Amino acid sequence: MSTTVLDRTAPTDAPVLDILAERWSPRAYDESSAIDEGKLASALEAARWSPSAYNNQPWRFIVARRGSAAHAAIADTMIDFNKTWATKAGVLVVAVAELESDEGRVHPTAHYDLGQAVAHLSVQAHHDGLFVHQMTGFDAPAVHAHFDLPDRLEVLSLLAVGDLGDAAQLPEGARERETAPRERRPIAETVLVND
Ligand SMILES: Cc1cc2nc3c(=O)[nH]c(=O)nc-3n(C[C@H](O)[C@H](O)[C@H](O)COP(=O)(O)O)c2cc1C
């Protein structure tokens, strides 16, 4: 497949690691390629080794390869816009927070810890040539119910993970977003106190 190569490197105001500047969230995935299992294992391993409060590791993942029953069930819960592109990625990963241990111990920073684990997963995946696009445009309670998860687990987000496809093949709307300038507010508006 001939792919339109996009340079989506962030125009940072201060130098950052190449991997952080170069990571971005595509919508053009190659639906002809299966996930590289070694790279997927590395991405999950990176999440495994991220830090967490009390080393609680309050993250869980549902890994659903394209073509599987789990993949079809998750895809079914996506908003229409996400269905148009995210179903083409080799894998969908559901990110799940463990709010409480099975012994009833509360994990107050479960969301924070899960987000950090997903960040590590994303960076490792990007380093290995996989692309990650996180989503909340899906029915999280429906996924929770489908997989019969206990109440102490909360479905938080969904990740499309796979090989980059051709942006030119995207439906209108998604195609424009793929090439729109990457923007962030200035750091001065983010740092509340800088004494
Ligand atoms: C928690 C979360 C939820 C998101 N939900 C969606 C979504 O449902 N659909 C979508 O197209 N993009 C979604 N995004 C992608 C963001 O729009 C994207 O990360 C943001 O515009 C920054 O772009 P970048 O990741 O390329 O730097 C989501 C991102 C995050 C972190």
Image: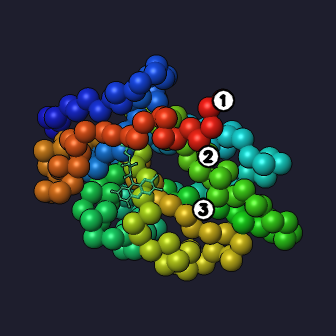
Between marks 3 and 1 in the image, the one whose residue lies nearer the viewer:
1
User: On the rendered structure, is 166 left or right of 62?
Assistant: left
Residue density around tag 1, few if under 14, some if 14–19, many if 20 or more, within 10 Å: few
Q: Residue at x 67, y 40 (%)?
A: 50
Residue corresponding to mark 3? 96
Residue corresponding to mark 1? 195
Image spot of residue 190 (x, y percent): 52, 41
Q: Which mark is residue 117?
A: 2
Whichever of labels 2 and 3 marks the residue nearer the N terminus, that label is: 3
Q: Point out the image quarter for the C terminus.
A: top right
Image spot of residue 47 (x, y percent): 62, 43
Q: Residue at x 83, y 48 (%)?
A: 54
Q: Nearer the viewer, residue 175 or 130?
A: 175
Residue density around tag 3, few if under 14, some if 14–19, many if 20 or more, within 10 Å: many
Q: Which amino acid type corresponds to the residue marked 2 in the rendered image?
A: Ala
Q: Which amino acid type corresponds to the residue marked 3 in the rendered image?
A: Val
